[in-house]
Image (cartoon, helix red, strand yellow):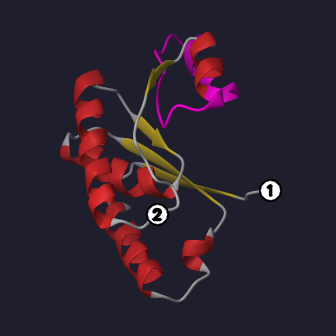
Amino acid sequence: MSLVKALQAEGHEVHTVAPFDQFSAILAREGCINHDVKMDSRGANPLKDFGLFFELFFIYKKIKPDVVLHYTIKPNIYGTLAAAALRIPTINNVCGLGTIFLKDNFVSSVAIKMYKFAFRFPKKVFFSKSG
């Protein structure tokens, strides 16, 4: 919330793009413009993930942000690719290592390759310790 308030204090309009949850109303009260997105954060269905890319692409195309800040694995990958296709600069935050880097299986292998490809595009990438 401190980042949101700091951006607003500098005169920026802040949009959030995430599945609606209990925090959506809090963000709206603080002046954020919320955009609902269908995202299965734990699933590994390539069709749903491909749909997420297009959903983010059309949201970004509509709101025309100056920059996009991504926080979790799927937005870090699919959001970065959608923003890159629209030539919108991105900043990514990777919080902790996550299970994707701790497992040795096909899904993890594909996710790591996708991370490597998508992370060619962000202007900045931050790694933060979780917990």
The picture places residue 96, in percent across and down from the top left corner, at 67, 63
Give the quarter of the image for residue 110.
Answer: bottom left
Give the quarter of the image for residue 120.
Answer: bottom left
Which one is in front, 31 or 7?
31
In the depicted structure, whether residue 61 falls above or below residue 129:
above
What residue does disc 1 label? Answer: 131
Q: Which residue is drawn at 45% across and 45% down?
A: 91
Range shown magenta: 1-23
Q: Which residue is drawn at 68% across and 27% down?
A: 1
Q: Nearer the viewer, mark 2 or mark 1?
A: 2
The picture places residue 82, in percent across and down from the top left corner, at 26, 46
| Quarter that holds the C terminus | bottom right
Instruction: Check if residue 5 falls in the magenta segment.
Output: yes
What's under tag 2, amino acid-wise?
Answer: Gly
What's under tag 1, amino acid-wise?
Answer: Gly
The picture places residue 23, in percent across and down from the top left corner, at 64, 28
Which one is in front, 5 or 45?
45
User: Is there any visible trace of residue 121 in the rendered image?
Assistant: no
In the depicted structure, whether residue 16 falls above or below residue 105:
above
Numbered circle sitting on residue 43: 2
Give the quarter of the image for residue 100.
Answer: bottom right
